[in-house]
Image (tube, rainbow, N blue to C red):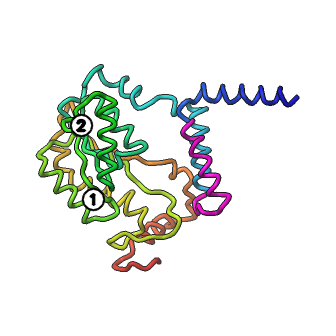
Amino acid sequence: MKAAVAALLAILVAVFIALCPLHMDGLREFVPLLWGCVTETNPWCSVSFLGWLYSLHADLVAGRGSETAEQIAAKHLPAGPALEGRVAIVTGANSGIGRETTRVLLMRGCHVVLAVRTVSKGEDALTELSRELGLNSTHSGKVLELDLSDFDSVKAFAAAFATLELPLHYLVANAGVMALPERRLSKQGHEMQFASNHAGHYLLARLLEARILAAGTATAPARAVFVSSHGYDVWENKGAGSLTKRLADQVPPGSTTPS
């Protein structure tokens, strides 16, 4: 009986992997998520778990997550270095979605500026990706420091990019923090997650807006892409004005004390 149950479970796991190969990363994410819930070290436990379940359902039922970024790019771009001569900035480019986006852009011939909080990690990522793709890292990319939670760092990054005298065809606003264990404030006094994920990216896009507009054409438009999450699906609106109030709590008017 036990052998039959084990065999059935093995078959179910095999079917799951066959149907949803990319969500193996999701399974690896589930273990620390579960640990954070059990030990109560993750204050966003319920939201994180609901987001994970939604992703699992979307992958299996709606078919999302069944293609890699490379496969999606192949559908819309001709073979070879289709993005040669074009320039992209990817925030948070040394890991996760940012790294994979950087890999595919480099593979397609794009020059990528890796905007990262820790320069050494960005340089390691660029070196590894260039080696994997058989590229010269000096020519294929550039690493610049960017701490999105600090508006001074965002301004310094925009100034540093300007000195490169490059066009800007793509801004991929990907970097972010999530589920901080305790409330923290940025250098300018904003809630850290709001500052990093939203305000910092907004300021960056506005500072680079002129370059993005100048680089685009009617046939080959430039664009800014803002990576989001499934967080909006679990937002509970408890009445008129509640969303505005919550956002106002994150942007204290001239004060660093929580509302």
Q: Residues within 10 Å of mark 1 (few under 14, many from 20)?
A: some
The circle on residue 137 is 2
**Residue, x 57% and y 48% (percent of image)?**
51
- Amino acid type of the residue that numbered disc 1 sits on in the rendered structure: Leu
At mark 2, the secondary structure is: helix
Residue 132 versus residue 117 in the image, above or below: above
Q: Which residues are magenta?
A: 24-45
* Residue 36: in magenta span: yes
Q: Relative to 175, is 23 on the left or the right?
A: right
Q: Nearer the viewer, mark 1 or mark 2?
A: 2
Residue 113 versus residue 136 in the image, above or below: below
Q: Picture coordinates of residue 136 (x, y %)?
A: 22, 33
Q: Main secondary structure of the magenta part?
A: helix
Residue lying furthest top: 79
Q: Nearer the viewer, residue 70 or 225?
A: 70
Q: Which of the two discs, 1 and 2, labels the residue nearer the N terminus?
A: 2
Q: Picture coordinates of residue 20 (x, y %)?
A: 58, 30
Q: Relative to 225, is 63 on the left or the right?
A: right
Q: Picture coordinates of residue 19 (x, y %)?
A: 60, 26
- Amino acid type of the residue that numbered disc 2 sits on in the rendered structure: Ser
Q: Quadrant of residue 99?
A: top left
The circle on residue 203 is 1
**Residue, x 39% and y 75% (percent of image)?**
252
